[in-house]
Image (tube, helix red, strand yellow):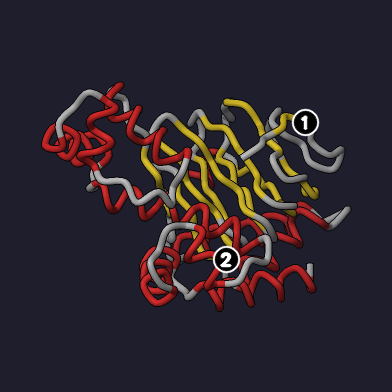
Amino acid sequence: MHETRQTAPASLDLPVGPPQGGGLLPHGFQLDTHVHAEGLLVYAVSGIATMVTQQGTWIAPASRITWTPPGFEHAYRFYGETEVRVLSLPLGDSAALPARPGVFVVTPLLREALLALIDRATTRPDARERLRAVVIDELVEAVDRSIHLPEPRDDRLLAVTEALRADPARPVTLTELGRAAGASERTLSRLFHHELGMGFRQWRTLLRIHHALLHLGDGMSVTDTAITCGWANPTSFIDAFYAVVGQTPGRYQAELRATTRTS
C-alpha cells in the first residue's frame, strides 16, 4: 500500500519526547524508526495503527491501544484516516506494564481516562496523577489482543514473506514459494517455526487478517473482504478473524462505525 511520510499535526507531539497529544492522520502516514526514554501508548480511536520493530509488526485496529516500553526502537504506520491519541508514561509508571510491546483492548473506563488526560486543556497535577493511575490499573487488567506479525532474518525466508506480502490472497504453496526462494519446503517450514515461532499457514493467515482489517475499515463488505484476502468462503474467514481479533468482522465493523460517529 502507498505510504507517505508527513509532518505530524501541530496537536500531535511526535516523535520527539515525551510525546503527548492527538490528531487526525491521513492514510499512509508514517513515522520512521525512533526511540523514547519513556513508555508510549498510542490509541487508535479510528483507523489502524501499526507499530513496526525489528521483531515484527504489531497491528492495532480501531479501539485498540499499542504499548511500547521505554527505550524500545519502533516506527509507526497508519492506514485509513486514523484518529489517534498519544500518551507517554514515566519510567515509574511504565514498570507496571509488560517489558515487551503489545496491543490491548480499550475498556470504556480506559478510553475516558485517556481522553481526559490528553484532551483537557488544563487539569490539576493531582487530578492528572489519579487519571494516570486509572490508565495503569486498566492496562494491567486489560486483555492482550496483540496481532503480532513477526519478521524473518534469513534471506530465503524474507523472500518468501515478501512474495506473500505482494499478494496475500494468492493460493500459492510453500513448495512453490521455495522454488523461487531457492529453498526446499522442509527448510522453509523449519525456518518459519525457528525464526517466527509459527508455521507458514499461520503467518499467512495473520498477514491476511491485517489486510482484512484495512478493507473492513474502508467499508468493504465481509463477503468481499473474505474473497479479496484469499478465503474460499465467508464462514472460514469469520472463524479465522474471530480467532485472531476476538470478535467477528461484522461486529468489528459495527463498532468501528459507532466509534467514528462518537469521536
Provide the residue designation for mark 1.
Answer: 6
Question: In the rendered view of the protein, which quadrant contains the N terminus?
Answer: top right
Secondary-structure class at tag 2: loop
Q: Is residue 234 above or below residue 83?
A: below
Question: In the rendered view of the protein, which quadrant contains the C terminus?
Answer: bottom right
- Circle 2 or circle 1, nearest the eye: 1
> Could you tell me residue 131's position as x and y percent?
67, 61
At x 62% / y 53%, what residue is drawn?
Answer: 48
Image position of 97 (left or right of 5): left
At x 64% / y 77%, what residue is drawn?
Answer: 254
Q: Amino acid at mark 2?
A: Val
Observer-nearest residue: 141 or 160? 160
Observer-nearest residue: 68 or 204? 204
> Could you tell me residue 65's position as x and y percent?
57, 55
- Residue 106 image label: 2
Secondary-structure class at tag 1: loop
Numbered circles on residues, count = 2
- Distance, label 2 to label 1, CA atoms, is 27 Å
Within 10 angstroms of label 2, few (less than 14), some, or many (20 or more) residues? many
> Could you tell me residue 113's position as x and y percent?
68, 64
At x 52% / y 53%, what residue is drawn?
Answer: 211
Question: In which quarter of the view is residue 76 placed?
Answer: top right
Image position of 157 (left or right of 19): left
